[in-house]
Amino acid sequence: MKTWKALITVGLGIALMPLVAPAGELLSVINDTLARDAELSAANSEIAIEREEVPLARAALLPRLDGGWGRTYNQIKTDNGPTTKYWQNGWMVTLTQPVFDWERWVELRQASIASAKAELEYASTWQALVLRSANAYFDLLAATQEHTRATDYLRAVREQHALTVKLQAGGEATVIDVQEALSRLSEAQLRQQDALRALDSSQRALATLTGRNITPTELSSTRRTKPWLKAKSLQQWVHQAETYSFPVQLGKLELRNADQNTEKARAQRYPVINLTASHSPVGASSGYSEPTTTNSAMLTISAPLFTGGANRARIRQAVAGEEKAQNTLLAATRKSAADTQEWFQRFNWAQERSNALGEIVRLNESSLEATRIGYRTGSRSNLDVLRAQEVLFASRGERAKAQYEMLSAYLALKAEVASLGMADIKMLDNWLTSDDQES
């Protein structure tokens, strides 16, 4: 029993820690979500329910004392004699003690497993909620930045359109240049409207989780790509997932419970031994006209002699259930390993992509500035400027997207190994708001 109890230590240590942390915006979002989520509250109540199964199962092995009181009317008829009628009042105390009942011992073990399973399911629900709310916050940040970029792009296109109109008035730009600028202006306006709708949708989704409207704080920068994930090989991550991921831990508990079901099915073949004792004073025993006191004690042994094949069927059924649990555990282990590899690769890819896009943005900024200078001197066309603007703002959007994909992959990777906790959220919160970031 110590083995499977040790397995849930990692998840419970994370999920049952204090929910309130020094609140940056991300931490505040997580805490609000945890405080109001009904599913998490239900999982917490399930823990309280399942914990009571242990004392209930234990009680079935302890002595039971029952008491009662009754009033009886008696009538005794005797041939060739008078009829006797009388009332009797009496009470009774009965003690019952199971001496040997293996099935009840197995049920006590299963009650402990059910309690541990409820705690694991709570930890899994807690972690999934943290991951979901963090991703919703990242979506809001991304939508906010996309709206900012769309607004900046619209402003740049408007300025270029105004400049083109001015140059046309001086004979330095053509009607085609003006039409191109106007076309890009319409596209920029539509892009800003789409960004605004996406922002509104992200705010509603996060408000559903937290119960309040969230206006994200302005980020200092999103250019930092310093590898803040502690160095670990892929094999270490996979091994941890195959050992500690919540589906694997739950699968191990299910397998142990299935093993106990087999043991309980076999226990129905064993004899059951009970000790009973009773004390019934003052005429509680019927058939006597005078008050009597009856004391009795009895040791009973009962065993099934013939059940029509029911016991054998139960054992076969339990063995099949054990085999099913083994295969379910194997599938969960393989899936956890595969998902961990996927998120590990996604994190690395997003980090590399973010690094590359940071350099691309820097080059596109220089290219736009050079194209604007060339346009003023006549070596570049209006269309060249518009294209350079579009490429720059697109690369900025891709860079921010890669940043949030990296954050999301990091949290998902931690979740796969059941080690996602408030410390990780606090680190990301500091990372998002820190001024000490590398370009």
Image: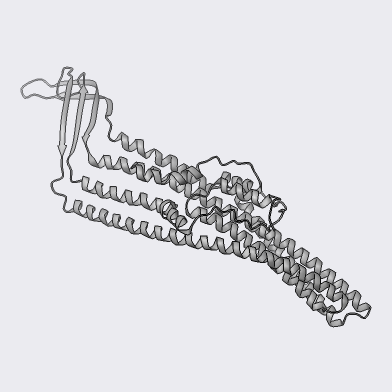
227 vs 67: above or below: below
Tell me where residue 174 sits by quadrant: bottom right
Residue 27 appears in the rendering:
yes
415 left or right of 60?
right
268 left or right of 237?
left
The quadrant of the image that shows the C terminus is bottom right
Q: How many marks?
A: 0
Q: Nearer the viewer, residue 426 or 247?
A: 426
- Furthest residue to the left? 80
Q: Nearer the viewer, residue 347 or 405?
A: 347
Name the residue: 22% across, 38% down.
Answer: 101
Name the residue: 42% across, 45% down.
Answer: 8
Percent coordinates x, y for residue 394 in the rendering:
70, 69
Q: Colour mode?
A: one colour
Percent coordinates x, y for residue 10 in the rendering:
46, 45
Name the residue: 32% across, 56% down.
Answer: 326
Percent coordinates x, y for residue 395 in the rendering:
69, 68
The quadrant of the image that shows the N terminus is top left
Percent coordinates x, y for residue 336 in the rendering:
44, 58
174 left or right of 415?
right
Residue 205 appears in the rendering:
no
Tell me where residue 377 sits by quadrant: bottom right
Q: Nearer the viewer, residue 34 or 380?
A: 380
32 left or right of 2?
right
Name the residue: 55% across, 47% down.
Answer: 37
- Furthest residue to the top? 290
